[in-house]
Image (cartoon, rainbow, N blue to C red):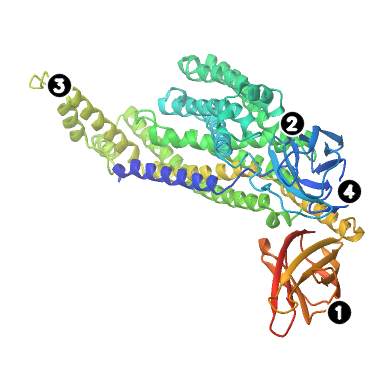
Amino acid sequence: MTQTIAPRVRTLVLLLLAAVCALLAGAGPVSAHAAVTGSDPAQGAVVDQAPSRISLTFSEQVALSGDSLRVLDPEGKRVDTGEPSGVGGTTYAVRLQSGLSDGTYTVAYQVVSADSHPVAGAYTFSIGAPSKTSVAVSGQGADDGVVGWLYGFGRYVSYAGFIVMAGGAAFVLACWPRGSGVRPVQRFVVSGWLALTASTLALLLLRGSFTGSGKVSDVFDLSLLGQVLQTKTGAALVSRLLLLAAAALFIAVLFGAYDKREDPQEKRDLSFGLAIGGVVVAAGLAASWAMSEHASVGLQAGVSMPVDVLHLLAVAAWLGGLGALLVALYRAPADAPVDASAVRRFSRVAFGSVLVLIVTGTYQSWRQLGSWSAFTDTRYGQLLLAKIALVVVLVGVAWISRRWTGRLTEAVSAAAERTKVRAGAGASGETDADAGAGAGTRADATAPTDGEPTAEESAAEESATEPTDSEPADPERAAQLARQRAARDAARQKRLRDADPHRFGLRRSVLAEAGIAVVLLAVTTVLTQTEPGRTEQEARAATSSSSSASADTGTSGALTLNMPFDTGGQDGKGVVTIDLDPARVGANEMHVYVERPDGKAFDIPEVKVEFTLKAKDIGPLPVVPDHLAVGHWSANGVQIPMAGDWQVDVTVRTSEIDEVTVTKNAQIG
């Protein structure tokens, strides 16, 4: 059984990494944390006169650059002048050139929200009447390419590095001081520091391209790096690097001077100093996230930031300590195994961390969601439900680990009691019978458990590894024998570790905890990159209200479509004209005019109109207008359920057998 432990661990780790990669790959591009709640002109609007400027209103303040707001004419040429600027509150505008011709114009925006995430998008409006445009409104974001993927992966690594470093160091200092001298635990903590440092440097380099062009070639642009350093996110990343220098000194003392201290009083004093310094450094590192992301903007930011710091510290103490415990259980040498008291102390630390997570997580959930419906109606709420489910499962597995800890503690206490009894019997002078009984007890106590080598086997193994005169003098052969001895020693240490069924069960449950924790961290990383549910719902409400208000007031002119037709029969040529007023979501008035090529109105046997929104699979919605006069039909209350690029199909029948359908697309709503 013991020989299959390492392969099982490797297999589980690979499966967990695959799950994380699948989760990150399925996360899609980073969602914006600020949303457009209004614009002037409105999306899809048809205005009679060219506006002097366009303005956008966001759900929170955003940072602008020279190209944050661009307006393009139907040929794709820029028609905005000057740099965009704020005009009050969360509204930003850019001026337009004078004398703009009729047609459809595209407004493209790319800004950075107050919580450091890029916000990009585009919409269209028309002057006079809609027209064809060569501008593609899709793919405007810079965060959905290679740079965006690398930035998201860097954020995951930075969170993982902080948790491993801070939680591992806390486990050694608070739960298992002997672990400061165990090489696998040292490597675990140092690897966390290296991962956090490397990912922070990478994020600093990627930041300019991530919020700008999204090009890989701009990653090493020093001018962009200089701009990043002047932003709130850049300041947070630089602060994190400075604090990591202090963390390196802390780790050096923990695994150096602290481990070598032999005087108990000196070790206690140094432990107290390290605890104070470690908490300060860890809190500062956690604040580098809180000061630049979700917690720094929105409702009750002054309360949310310290709560976010506590949340991150609790996560690190729990999950990072769990990882350190896993390393200690699997990699600690047989002569210095992690003891039951250390596991028991970590169990208390983990329980306290879970309580802190429940309190801080409940507050942050209320702050980011705002309503129960946001749990199911928004992506943020759905991810939060997944996170809660994972935490519940993780706590359940932790309860199993706690039971194994209790059994291990009972076994250790029973063994200590047996040792004490034997020592007392030997000191009091035992009779011949007692001596025989005591010998039997000792023999039972020292008898190997399943998988543990007997004394004869150990002696034989040791004698087999002793060098003899018959051993070859060939250095390669000697090196091969040395590797074989090392492999046998490692196998013997594994058998000794795996001999205790309670310790073996604890290791398996802790490994399961660590696996769930890896997936939980991936969900949390995606959650921090997702637009909060409260913001998403507010943006929806504002957009709906704006659309309704525009529809009620009829601020845009009528939409006019001229479509020539030819049914192929006698007098089968002409022009059909569709007028839709106010061309908005809701009820509209429609007029249909049929004229000959010379402009004279004439009647035809039948005319029908259908509206189809292919992007949303709506329609066709048939409309049969009433005949009013020669060449004139009308229909009231034509319902347009949603704004979008609608396809208008007009069927014209000029005789019993001559009929044709003409089509044209138009932005309605």
Q: Is residue 193 above or below residue 511?
A: above
Residue 637 position in % (x across, y down): 86, 71
x 62%, y 39%: residue:
143
Mark 1 or mark 4, which is nearer the start of the sequence?
Answer: 4
Distance, label 4 to label 1, CA atoms, is: 33 Å
Q: Quadrant of the C terminus?
A: bottom right
Kindly check if marks 4 and 1 are in contact, taking CB atoms under 8 A apart as contact.
no
Is label 4 or label 3 in front?
4
Classify mark 1: residues with Cα within 10 Å, few (<14), some (14-19) or many (20+): some
Q: Is residue 401 above or below residue 210?
A: below
Numbered label attached to residue 49: 4
Classify mark 2: residues with Cα within 10 Å, few (<14), some (14-19) or many (20+): few
Residue 7 visible at all: yes
Kindly check if marks 2 and 1 are in contact, taking CB atoms under 8 A apart as contact.
no
Mark 1 or mark 3, which is nearer the start of the sequence?
Answer: 3
Label 3, on which residue?
A: 467
Mark 1 or mark 2, which is nearer the start of the sequence?
Answer: 2
Label 1, on which residue?
A: 627
Numbered label attached to residue 65: 2
Classify mark 3: residues with Cα within 10 Å, few (<14), some (14-19) or many (20+): few
Mark 2 or mark 3, which is nearer the start of the sequence?
Answer: 2
Is label 4 or label 2 in front?
4
Distance, label 3 to label 2, CA atoms, is: 74 Å
Q: Is residue 560 above or below residue 317?
A: below
The secondary structure type at the circle numbered 4 is loop
Distance, label 4 to label 2, CA atoms, is: 28 Å
The secondary structure type at the circle numbered 1 is strand
What amino acid type is highlighted by mark number 2? Ser
Residue 554 position in % (x across, y down): 90, 59
What amino acid type is highlighted by mark number 4? Gln
Residue 441 position in % (x across, y down): 29, 39
